[in-house]
Image (spheres, grey):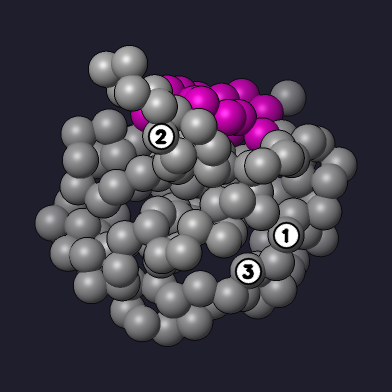
Amino acid sequence: MAKLNAGDKAPDFELSDQNDSTLRLEDLKGKKLLLYFYPKADTPGCTKQSCNVRDAREELAALGVDVIGISPDAPGKQKKFDNKHGLGFTLLSDQDNSIAKAYGAWGEKSMYGKKYEGIIRSSMLIDENGQVIQTWYEVSPKDTVPKALGTLKE
């Protein structure tokens, strides 16, 4: 899948969140957004990434940034993940991976020498008008927040 670059229009989406409410990118116009894709709720890397985002929410909010996590997990699993770790922000369910593909966060991966298709841990900043500010593909769970904050404070 083609990766997004700074200046690209962020693809719209319409997905269910952990509370079974529908959210579209269009609904977020007027707000900056840190959008991140993670492979699976409540796994070690995804938990670390999401908890780091949770811990930085106040700082991000002070910079006018909302946060959304997206994974292929069903809304019920997202809800358990949110509750268990007190995340307190929107987690969207992309069960068919169509949005991950549209954002370039889906592709070939390798584990123990075996190749397979899956979520490429990625994050991106999107401006108030739906334009991509910056993207980070294959981002480390610990680097999602520092990279976003670094760009926002430039």
Residue identifier under label 3: 13
Instruction: Find the distance from the CA under tag 1 to the CA under tag 2.
Output: 25 Å
Outermost residue to the left: 84
Task: Give the alpha-carbon distance from disc 1 to disc 3, as whole Å.
Answer: 6 Å
The reply to whether discs 1 and 3 touch (Cβ–Cβ < 8 Å) is yes
Going 50% across and 32% down the picture, which residue do you hit? 108
Q: Which amino acid does label 1 sit on?
A: Pro
Residue that appears at 20% across and 34% down: 44
Closest to the observer, 59 or 27: 27
* Element carrying mark 1: loop
* Amino acid type of the residue tagged 3 in the rendering: Phe
Which residue lies most toward the front here?
114
Occupied quadrant, residue 6 = top right
Residue 32, quarter of picture: bottom right
- State left or right for residue 19 relative to residue 131: left
Residue annotated with mark 2: 116
**Are circles 1 and 2 on residues that touch, CB within 8 Å?**
no
Q: Residue drawn at (40%, 54%), measured in percent from left and top?
A: 71
Residue picked out by circle 1: 11
Q: What stretch is highlighted in magenta?
A: 135-151
Asked if residue 113 can be seen in this view, the reply is yes
Task: Answer whether residue 139 is magenta in the image.
Answer: yes
Residue 8 sits above or below residue 92 on the image: above
